[in-house]
Image (spheres, grey):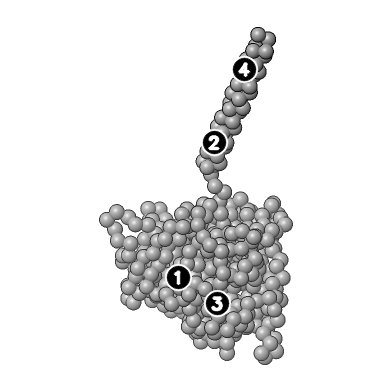
Amino acid sequence: MRSDGLVRTRSWMSAQRVITILCVLVLLTCLTAVGSARTHNRPASPSVYFIAATPAQADTPRWYPAALYALGEKQKLRLVRQVFTAQQYFSGLADDLHGRIYLAAGKAISVIHEDDPEREDLVSLGGFDNFPCWGTVQGEDLASRVQFCYGPEIREVLGDAEPGNPRVAKGSWTKFKYLQYGGQVGGPFQIQPPLAEVAGTTLVMPYASRPEVVLAQLPPELAASPAKGRNARIIASTDRYLAIWLTPEYMLGHTISTANPDHDEPLHVPVLYRATNKWKTLELPTAVSSITNPAIRIFGDWLVTTRMEWRPGPPGSGSGSPGKENERLADLDSGVPDIRDEYYNRFLNLYIPGRLLIQNLVDGRKLTLETGQEDSEVLAIRADGQILYRVNDSIYSARISDKQIEVSTLVVKDDNAPDVHWAFWGPAAKSGQPATSLKSLD
């Protein structure tokens, strides 16, 4: 009896252990499932996206591919998708500063949607030309679109499909009143800025033609007779600011060539504060020649100027800017732009020390980002002060804190980085592959 009772007791205890173990396993399984669900439902961290694109220059009829990248692993760019091949003739990029970026090629415009960068949105065209007008417009009840001149007419491409409306339609000069333009990209391959003309006390478009739209009323000190045809390059045009540079009279009427390297330094840039309708003229410590455009760009309230100095060197020597030995050289068969050669030819006699001047248009703060390299530029500044900037083949992240720029962190080291001139923050990348070379895209 005792033996039989002991067996029953031990069997009961074993059964209890099994039940306990099973309960623990079930509990662990439930906890794992809950944790997995929470991880699955947790918002993915935002990603940084980069656009690598080099438009062909008028005097160098070569074409290059354009690509969209995301920040990848091990400080490498990750290809999200190829936007255009070199054979599709990428011509220019326009940003509406509100979440739509337009890349134009010979017979198509690709729209990058910052809230959904992986979306492919290609609009076919019969043909494209970016002179004498090309730019994005948006404002009030006017939805985002890009306009360009094509022969005697203006055409527009809508940023999104609208019910009952074609994506490609006839545009108008009057819509350029809502022009959105973020300024000149860095690097040696500049993009033609929008042109305007001073007619009395008004700033009008188009340039050198019958005025179709008044962009702004000018203060008396900027007035000029319409007969003079004084042109103005638009430095920036946003919801908050309109910044222009008036070409000095001694630089007008000349053929743009290295044989006539007229220059202006420092630059006096009138800025219209749209909220108060008041003009303020800034003196920016940089130079421009007859074959370059002002290297100035705007991000929200931050105006960024690339420091340049007029410093002619001995014939054939260039200006001796620092960092040339770190710039990419490329032969005709490489499929990528030759950075060093373009700086040498385009920025003749301009010394570029690698100094980026960052100025806040609201509170007047002035900061300097020292890179010590000619080929450097700010790519983006977020409202919270986060900065992305490029130095040769490296991209760094930093933050503006009060009156200083906090320690920079390397985020990208990639052979394709010299071709990156635009960046934005967007949702986490869902796809992509390691980036090799832009040449491989063709």
List the residue tagged with mark 4.
12
Left or right: where 432 falls relative to 136: right
Residue 20 higher or lower than 299, as above or below: above
Residue 208 higher or lower than 78, as above or below: below
Are the two marked residues, 3 and 1, in contact with CB atoms closer than 8 angstroms? no
Q: Which mark is residue 336?
A: 3
Q: Is residue 399 visible?
A: yes
In which quarter of the view is residue 400 placed? bottom right
Marks 2 and 3 sit apart, C-alpha to C-alpha, by 49 Å
Q: Position of residue 264 (x, y in %)?
A: 61, 77
Foreground mark, 3 or 4, reads 4
List the single residue furthest toward the left. 164
Q: Secondary structure at mark 4?
A: helix
Foreground mark, 2 or 3, reads 2
List the residue tagged with mark 2.
33
Q: Residue at x 69, y 78 (%)?
A: 325
Q: Residue at x 47, y 67 (%)?
A: 82
Q: Position of residue 394 (x, y in %)?
A: 65, 66
Marks 3 and 4 sit apart, C-alpha to C-alpha, by 78 Å
Are the two marked residues, 2 and 3, in contact with CB atoms closer than 8 angstroms? no
Mark 2 or 3, nearer chain start: 2
Q: Position of residue 301 (x, y in %)?
A: 58, 56
Marks 4 and 2 sit apart, C-alpha to C-alpha, by 32 Å
